Image: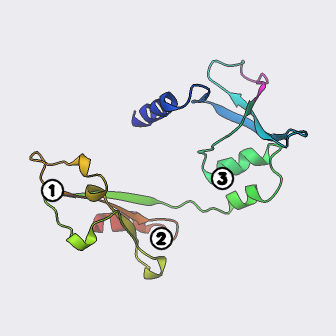
Amino acid sequence: GIMVTLVDRLAQSLALDVTVHTSSRVVSVRERVDGSTSRKTMLLRVETPGGASEGAAEPEQEFDLVLSTLPAHPLATLLERSECATGALPSLLRAFEPGSLAVVNVAYARDVLPTANRGFGYLVPSVEREPLLGVVFDSHTFPQQRRTLDDAPDTRLTCMVGGAKRPGECWECAVCV
């Protein structure tokens, strides 16, 4: 799929001394501070496909940098059961309310945006109380992705509707866009 291709390409483009772990499950996280240099590293226990047998303790691995792509609630759970649960981070992560978001792509075979609207797009301020969150002018942001056969100007928009402040409205509004 496209996400596997993206991850593979990112891994290929990184420096040679970088290791990317995919299809792996982080079991525990803890921070280690070197007393003499004050250098911080992260120690992770990671289960990898084909690794130690199920139920066996995996050795900790040391990392200079860890980027999490977990949603807020599972990350809070991981931190709570690890030695990194100090401070307010897990409770702050639990305070996040996930919201539904619909992305609607709209295309026209001609340029329908006024010249004054050239640019990236716009966001709708929350005081407007609209289900539309924002619009990206894809055809202006990425002109190299022309869709017309004769390479004539077209209009492609990405509309984002719904969100945490408008639960339940994303699908109704997506039909209206």
Q: Nearer the viewer, mark 2 or mark 1?
A: 1
Q: How did the renderer colour the structure?
A: rainbow
Residue 59 in picture, x, y percent from top left = 78, 24
Amino acid type at image mark 3: His
Disc 3 to disc 2: CB gap under 8 Å: no
Residue occupying image coordinates x 57% and y 25%? 16
Report which quarter residue 123 is drawn in: bottom left
Q: Earlier in the sequence, mark 2 or mark 1?
A: 1
Q: Is residue 177 above or below residue 158?
A: below
Could you tell me how far apart the alpha carbons at marks 2 and 1 are, in whole angstroms?
A: 34 Å
Q: Secondary structure at mark 1?
A: loop
Residue occupying image coordinates x 72% and y 22%? 54
Task: Assign the N terminus to one quadrant of the image.
Answer: top left
Q: Secondary structure at mark 2?
A: loop
| Farthest residue, direction bottom | 127
Residue occupying image coordinates x 61% and y 29%? 18
Q: Is residue 29 above or below residue 99?
A: above
- Please tell me the numbered disc located at residue 153: 1
Q: Earlier in the sequence, mark 3 or mark 2?
A: 3
Tell me if residue 58 is in the magenta stretch: yes
Range of residues picked out in magenta: 54-61
Residue 85 in picture, x, y percent from top left = 81, 50
Amino acid type at image mark 1: Pro
Left or right side of 35 for 58: left
Residue that mark 3 sits on: 73
Left or right side of 83 for 63: left
Asked whether 34 or 95 is in front, the reply is 34
- Please tell me the numbered disc located at residue 166: 2
Report which quarter residue 153 is drawn in: bottom left
Q: Nearer the viewer, mark 3 or mark 1?
A: 1
